[in-house]
Amino acid sequence: MPDTKNNLVIDRPVCPVCKSPKRTILISVKHNSDGFLDFIKFEKFYSKEFYESYTSGAIDDLLFEIAECGNCGLAYLTEVLNDNGMEMLYNKWLDKELLKDYYSQQEYSSYEESILKVIKKHFKHKEKVNVMDFGAGYGNFCSISTKLGINTFAFDLSTDKNDHINSMGVTIINNFEKYKGYFDFIYVNQVFEHVADPFGILSNLAQCLTEKGILYVAVPNAKDTKSTVKAEGLSQNLFRLLSPHQHVNGFNNNSLKQLGINVGLKPLSMLDFFGMLNSSFNLNELKFILKKGLKNSSVGTSLFFSRA
Ligand SMILES: [Zn+2]
């Protein structure tokens, strides 16, 4: 099938978080307009194949258009890759070798280790704690989790990455049906800014939680999208917030909370965190929960949710 606009993208006429059609268009530019290639080039991981498709005209007819939802405040691209386009992106347009090198050089995350230790303690009455990393990438989180003796599961779109994770003693999931009500903790780090239908994915994930299960979502904070578009146009700063094909949803604290609420989850508040504190956390763990949990619950875009 040749790459034409119609078999690569879909239009999003309403907000992908709250379904509201109310919106303001912040910027609207065709991919083949002057200077747009410089904007695309802020992405360091595009492959030769991507630029070949671009220059042969197959993918330069696309539209880069940012809308701001008048209801929940999400900034989102109106035209995004469909399933076929996503397949192209992750299997052809991004240079896998470059990505692999980059992720293998990432430092060990003591932040992720702290989250997992806190979760393990929170569910200490259970014989085995079941954790899923949704969008597991190259498995950095999974490798910490298995080392802590946690029953670890991973989901990722790319089959190539799955082979890598498989070798670490992690169970790869490709079907949620079998895992309804199964997970004590689901970790979704830097995923929802990339997907066309965050609502649909989070609905599925919410059903996979145990009754007391907790879900963590972290996305880049894109609260400054509007002011950045106004002040700088197609700048590198804007690219970090929203970019063609990759960062298609720009969340702020409110729109991320709304996403959870709309699928029946409850954002954990300050009070909820204080409720968790009467378990046996040590001083460092308490500091961690206070700093990460409390601060983020009111302003940030790294949030914890429970089943409502
Ligand atoms: Zn909305």
Image (tube, rainbow, N blue to C red):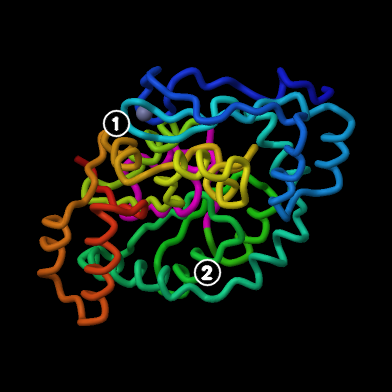
Q: Label 1 near label 2: C-beta < 8 Å? A: no
Circle 1: element type: helix
Circle 2: element type: helix
Up the image or down, 65 lies above or below 170; here it is above
- Residue depicted at 70% across the width and 44% down the height: 39
Position of the N terminus, as image quadrant, is: top right
Residue ID for mark 2 = 143
The amino acid pointed to by label 2 is Ser
Up the image or down, 204 lies above or below 149; here it is above
- Residue depicted at 28% across the width and 69% down the height: 118
Outermost bottom residue = 283
Which residue range is magenta in the image?
Answer: 171-196
Q: Horizontal and vertical percent for residue 282?
A: 21, 81
Image check: 60 left or right of 15? right
In space, the residues marked 2 and 1 are separated at their CA atoms by: 32 Å
For the question of whether residue 177 can be seen, the reply is no
Position of the C terminus, as image quadrant, is: top left
For the question of whether residue 221 can be seen, the reply is yes
The amino acid pointed to by label 1 is Asn
Q: Tell which of 105 and 138 is nearer to you.
A: 105
Residue 123 colored in magenta in the image: no
Q: Horizontal and vertical percent for residue 140?
A: 54, 66
Q: Horizontal and vertical percent for residue 245?
A: 64, 37
> Neighbour class for label 1 at 10 Å: few (<14), some, many (≥20)?
some
Up the image or down, 300 lies above or below 110; here it is above
Outermost front residue = 231
Ligand 1 image position (quadrant): top left
Q: Horizontal and vertical percent for residue 207?
A: 33, 37
Please identify, in this view, whether the residue under mark 2 or under mark 1 is nearer the observer.
1
Name the mark on residue 262: 1
Say which quarter of the image contains residue 205: top left
Residue 185 colored in magenta in the image: yes
